[in-house]
Image (cartoon, helix red, strand yellow):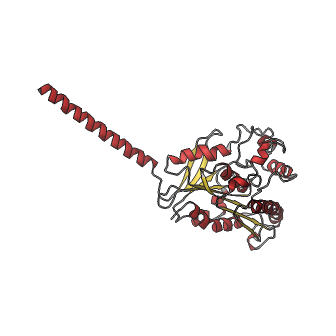
Amino acid sequence: MRSGRKFAGRLRTIITVLAAAGLLSTLGAAVATAAPAGGREDLVVPSSMGPIKVQVQWAARGGSSALYVLDGLRAPGDHNQWVSDTDVLRQFAGDNVTLVFPVGGRSSFYTDWYRPSSTNGQKSTYKWETFLTRELPAFLAKRGVSRTNNAVVGASMGGNAALTLAAHHRDQFKFAGSFSGFVNPTFPAWNQAMRAAMWDEGQFNVDDMWGPASDPAWQRNDATMQAEKLRGLPIYISTGNGVPGVLDLTSGIGNTVNAMSLEAMSLTATQILRDRLGTLGIRARVDVLNGTHTWPYWQQAIATARPMILDALKVK
């Protein structure tokens, strides 16, 4: 009997220890996945392309929602231009949403390429859609960021990408915004315009991205062609009309002329997308404003989009 009581006592002790260990483990997991409250951080995220730098401004009160903010064609390798060329960090500083700024990917159109660019010695294949919809969300989930309550916006190259990513990944994105985006790349001869732009920015070969203009990948990565998949999604699309204004004064004449021509293309594409959405009966806010293809106007655009983003993500 005495040995039986000893065994029962030891068993209770073991159960208590195991239970305590389980509780501590659970608490530890909770701590590991709790989102930081406020502050900024530079992350290094593993990917099939190699380590990718991601700049983050954490939600002000530790919320789990996130806004992905995509760069333009000339995306630098050391920072996201939204951080350096706009006041977006200040705009969202008090909001309970994490801002996510992927770094790099110039001339990538934030898409999955067929192969590395054959004209500039690129080592790995761009796989930006995979990164933004699988690898990065999985990494951020370990820091308490939701994989399903995200918004995505982008300027220029990133504008079309924001819409197509949202179209193909409705389980992840609850809002999409395009600012001066080239949202109709299948428009006749525009693949050649993209070819020239990508060659100018890093000698990238557009054929290694989506193949020839007849390849189905072009339509898959065209926001206008994918418009039906945007039905029911809150959307904000803006473009300038190519007419320079006060915000262009610091850009210099050469830059302003270039920005005028680029915005003329964006204007045409945006009007085509607007008409397509109207034909389909899909609601979206589309603004055509004075301005050119440059950062001060995109700073204004994201300020306009901000309350829509917070509402779509149910951020308070």
Task: Check the image and report above or below for 295 versus 229.
Answer: below
Q: Relative to 306, is 224 on the left or the right?
A: right
Residue 225 versus residue 29: which sits nearer the camera? 225
Residue 43 versus residue 185: which sits nearer the camera? 185
Instruction: Look at the image and tell me whether residue 137 can be seen.
Output: yes
Residue 195 versus residue 283: which sits nearer the camera? 283
Instruction: Look at the image and tell me whether residue 202 can be seen.
Output: no
Residue for point 66% across, 53% down: 166
> Percent x, y for residue 56?
56, 54
Instruction: Classify residue 254 by image quadrant.
Output: bottom right
User: Most extreme residue toward the right, as rendered?
Assistant: 189
User: Most extreme residue toward the bottom, as rendered?
Assistant: 246
Task: Check the image and report above or below for 243 versus 282.
Answer: below
Task: Check the image and report above or below for 27 versus 153.
Answer: above
Instruction: Count how many numbered circles sit on residues in the image.
Output: 0
User: Most extreme residue toward the left, as rendered?
Assistant: 2
Quadrant where the N terminus sits is: top left
> Percent x, y for residue 126?
70, 42
> Percent x, y for residue 118?
79, 38
> Percent x, y for residue 277?
75, 60
Task: Check the image and report above or below for 209 versus 225.
Answer: above
Q: Relative to 28, is 58 on the left or the right?
A: right
Q: Relative to 209, is 64 on the left or the right?
A: left
Q: Relative to 95, is 237 on the left or the right?
A: right
Residue for point 37% across, 41% down: 25
Residue for point 44% across, 46% down: 32
